[in-house]
Amino acid sequence: MYLLEHDAKELLRAFDIPSPPGRLLGSDDTIDRGTLPPGPWVVKGQIAAGGRGKAGLIRKAESAADVASHASEILGRSAKGQQVAAVRVEQQVSGAREAYVGFLLDAAGGGVRVIVSASGGIDIEHIPHENIHSALARPDESALRNCLNQLAQKLPPEIAPAVRDAGEKLARAFLGLEAMLLEINPLFVLADGRWIAGDAKLVTDDNALARRKELESVVRTRASAYTDVARKHEHGFDYVVVDPAGEIGLLTTGAGLSMMLIDEMRAAGLKPYNFLDIRTGGLRGETKRLTQVLQWIGEGKNVKVLLVNIFAGITDLGEFSRLLVTALGSANRLKVPVVARLVGTNLAAAREVLAPASIPLHTDLDAALAEVRKHLKT
Amino acid sequence: MINPRIDRTTPVIVQGITGRAGQMHSRLMMRYGTRIVGGVSPGAKVNEVNGAPVFATCAEAVEKAGAKASVLLVGAFDLLKAMEDAIDAGIRYLVTPTEGMPVHDALKAWKRCRDTGTVWVGASTPGVAIAGEAKLGFLPDDSLLPGPLGLMSKSGTLSYESGYRLAQAGIGTSVWIGVGGDPVKGTRYADLVPFYAADEKTRGLLVIGEIGGSEEEEFAQALVQHKFQKPVFALIAGRSAPEGVTMGHAGALVHGSHGTYTAKRAALEAAGVTVFGTLNEMVEGIRVRLR
């Protein structure tokens, strides 16, 4: 889960990692001077992606009126496929040096890559190579601390102690939150040697969510900011709206096959509405999950047809079809024609169930797509 | 060199055999021909599942049934401990279909496997199969036809569909390894390049990849490094996925320009790999090249 900067900073506070005082504001909040931290400010649009500065989502404000006008301009804007639902209004930090500290799970190396630089404040990709120092460490606290001490020696003496101290606390946070990426850029190093996190990029492991109460609580209390994660955590499968204006609802299983199907449909000029990995193995003879998903797909205003694509290595297609027909009957929000493409175990039984329900059944995907197209023309 | 070859004589156990998945898949694996010599379930109240004896520990399974390989069908938070039990007992071939292993656990497991020379395929692997011999995991029989194509895949379903369509076109597989969709895993595409280069039954190699991470890029590098001579084909899912959104697989997450479809395709093509845009093109392309 890619945490919004505001949530990342709040989580890091528990690990003694300070950030400038800031407030999260949504479009319903009124901005009045009394509730803001001391100025001047920086208004930062909250989306789960990098490059926010370039996208115009980060702006400096000298007065409360500036804050209000910047916030209203940034809120509701779309960047990187996400809509800005909140801004963090934060006190500006001035006169500080800007360093970089990052921890990145290195999947190929089987450890944690520790990265430091004295040239923070710009995208890591744009920092000159000779100014970046990095090494691979085992994922435990002492190995990470040793690694940081080694790397900090390569930095200018006026910032090395701050990077070392910040790095040690960040390492603890990286392990404690089971992070995959933790990057502080810029790390402000003040003239007196104190340091403060200017930005925070934190990506945690969704697989560990159930055993990390503090992260679970972020997802629960701020579900609207983490809809996909919250949904998966609650329901145990993946569903993502890939195109709110999409015309084809997808009832599919398997992450790879579902992704590929969306790719092929888009390349062919079709507009899929959602990604779904329903996990037929997890249905356990019940229609609850199917009905739920069909209701969600029913929220798509332009959805004109539902394509069911299941490759059943293990799942019994007869049983699946019975569940599908029942679920379609109770999903009152989705009233569109259905086209099924099924391959695998017990196809004959599926045919017997789907025919009376007037659901055309194909085994060839291209034939199913041709049938789907017919429903788009009307 | 990692050697993932097994055959119908390899003695295999299933850890978690008394669970729902353990019962079903031990039966399906036996039916395919895999030599399941037992199962492990620490608190089990039954003595056997599908005719296979149930042991309390891996050490017992090794001592009494001669287990050499294990398929682990246990919960995600229990997987690390179960793997350690197997490794401590001397089992050196682990296949872990369990989905949702925390990545920090996977790092610890990775280290243990490297230190002990254990072959680990997973986590979240659909399985391993030597068509016509044995399968460890979930791979559907309809997709398994013996033949000359090495196959590696992150995704289960996309590989089932691909294997099925290839089999329909008469193209079978030699050694099929589902490396799994997790970012930290026991066996990566690049790890298997030396094996496929040396394997006499493999005449071509298909990699089914997806966006996110850097495995496809590492694989391309390994091909060049090992001067891989056989034809290599690839299919990459997730071309149209939005940035920062996880599409089912934890590893399939794009950040900025890192892990994108374009970057992967370019790296693979530069290494001489034929990258297909659709399943139909893939089947046709491989058929023509391997004929």
Image: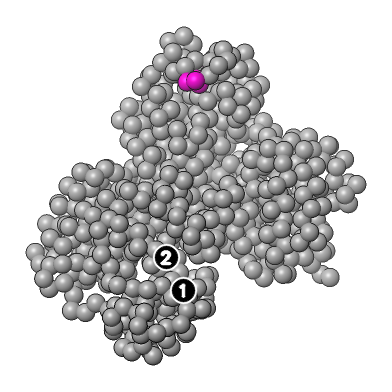
The residue at 29%/44% (across/down) is A139
Query: Could you tell me which secondary element the residue under label 2 belongs to?
Result: loop
Q: Nearer the viewer, residue A69 or B240?
A: A69
**x then y, percent, for residue B208:** 55, 46
Which mark is drawn over residue A4? 2
Q: Nearer the viewer, residue A345 or A160?
A: A160
Answer with mark 2 or mark 1, whichever residue precedes in sequence: 2
The residue at 36%/79% (across/down) is A35
Query: Based on the displayed image, in which of its 4 quarters is residue A312 positioned?
Result: top right
Q: Quadrant of the C terminus of chain B?
A: top right
**x then y, percent, for residue B16:** 52, 25
Question: Relative to B110, is A188 above or below?
Answer: below
Does the magenta portion include B209? no
Chain under label 2? A
Chain under label 1? A
**Kind of residue at disc 1:** Ala
Residue for badge 1: A86
Q: Would you say A337 lies left or right of B199 here?
A: right
What colouring does the structure picture have? one colour
Q: Would you say A332 lies left or right of B184 here?
A: right
Mark 2 burial class by Cα count in 10 Å: few <14, some 14-19, many 20+: many
- Report, in whole angstroms, how far the alpha carbon at label 2 lies from the one at label 1: 10 Å
Question: Relative to A171, is B145 above or below?
Answer: above
The residue at 20%/43% (across/down) is A142
Q: Tell whether label 1 touches label 2 (CB within 8 Å).
A: yes
